[in-house]
Amino acid sequence: MQESSINLGIVVADFNYDITYLMLQKAISHAKFLRANVKIVFKVPGSYDIPLAVKKILEKVDVDAVVTLGAVIRGETKHDEIIGSQTARLIADLSIQHGKPVTLGIIGPGATHEQAVERIEEYANRAVESAVKLALRYKKLESLGDIKETVYIE
């Protein structure tokens, strides 16, 4: 992949820090591997706080995509389901509103601590890779001229 021209923002939740700290390290490492530039890392208290930070980054920082990282661990109530579903919905809304990829690297809801630990690298890497791929594909789409035959954007 030729990702050297892709600029990323990362929003990461501090809640469940033992998990999210490692997710952030993996995400930064994977971005470097893909030759994408991480322009800003914005830490928020919890996953529920991620959407507003994403909004501010998309408004204030020149990025091609934003990666979100968090861990919503199952508890004794359904609180994790509320946090997870509302956060995911708002993240998707922001992506559409701003016309830029905002990827979901949030583990849960419904995950145990042990399951979250097992998914640290997978979720961080997939969120970064999706952001880079989508940003490159949208750039390619924007550069198209008059289309005379079927175009595949991969």
Image (cartoon, rainbow, N blue to C red):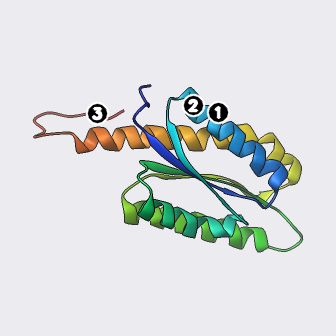
Q: Residue under circle 3?
A: 152
Circles 3 and 1 in contact, beta carbons < 8 Å: no
Of marks 3 and 1, which one's residue comes earlier in the chain? 1
Name the residue at 19% across, 39% down. Answer: 144
> Residue 53: x and y, percent?
57, 65
- Tell me residue 85's x, y (percent): 64, 68
- Quarter-of-image position of residue 25: top right
Q: Nearer the viewer, residue 35 or 143?
A: 35
* Residue 109 seen anywhere in this rendered image of the structure: no
- Spot occupied by residue 82 in the image (x, y as percentages of width and height): 70, 73
Q: Quadrant of the C terminus?
A: top left
Marks 2 and 1 in Cβ contact (< 8 Å): yes
What mark, if any, has residue 29 been given in the picture?
A: 1
Given residues 60 and 67, the one toward you in this image is 60
What is the spatial separation of the Cα atoms under label 2 and label 1, in whole angstroms? 5 Å
Which residue was labeled with disc 2? Answer: 32
